[in-house]
Each structure stands twice: as structure tokens, then as C-alpha cells.
Amino acid sequence: MTAIVPITELRNTSKILDLSENEPLFITKNGFGVRVIMNIEMFDRIKEYMLDYELAESLRRSEKDGGNVDGFDFIKELKDDPVFR
């Protein structure tokens, strides 16, 4: 279950740490969400997921735009290039 607590609860640090151990903890101020607290492992997983997503999206855009070249063709072009002879 998602935990939502008012910002005044940040004074109770042990409660905050307990609530944010296994899932993100949403902090509110005047009834509106203002922050999210999570443990480091969860943050690292999310960061890795976002990096993977960005790489996949970049590859997809590159394929769509025709910016990708087959690896064997690329090496052949390098071998044929007089600069690399």
C-alpha cells in the first residue's frame, strides 16, 4: 500500500525510514504532493531502468531515421577507406 504522510511527519525519522523501506513514501504539504522518499536500492533500480529506456529509445529513433549501419558493412567501409590503410 502506498504511504502518504504530511511534511510535519518528517520529524519522526525512524517512522519515515520504516515507511520508505519497501516502497516510495509520498510527502504532502497543504494536501498536495511535494516529494518522494525511497531507499537507495529502489532509486538505483529506477535509475537503471530509465537509462535502459533512454538507450532503447535512442536506438529506436536512430533506426527510424536510418542512422544505424550494419556492423559488418561499417567495418568493410573502414577497411576500404584510404585513411585507415
Image (cartoon, rainbow, N blue to C red):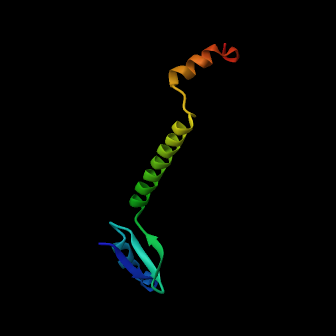
Using residue 12 as the reference point, say whether residue 85 is left or right of it: right
Residue 58 position, x and y percent, is 53, 43
Classify 10 as above or below 23.
below
In the rendered image, the quadrant that contains the C terminus is top right
Q: Residue at x 34, y 67 (%)?
A: 23
Classify 33 as above or below 24.
below
Q: Residue at x 34, y 68 (%)?
A: 21
Q: Quick one: which residue is furthest to the right in this view?
A: 83
In the rendered image, the quadrant that contains the N terminus is bottom left
Q: Nearer the viewer, residue 28 or 67?
A: 67
| Quadrant in the picture for residue 73 | top right
Q: Quick one: which residue is furthest to the left in this view?
A: 1
Residue 31 position, x and y percent, is 45, 85
Instruction: Please count the marks in the image.
Output: 0
Classify 43 as above or below 15.
above
Q: Nearer the viewer, residue 7 or 68?
A: 68
Residue 7 position, x and y percent, is 46, 83
Residue 17 position, x and y percent, is 38, 73
Q: Residue at x 43, y 70 (%)?
A: 37
Classify 22 as above or below 56.
below
Using residue 50 as the reference point, say whether residue 2 is left or right of it: left
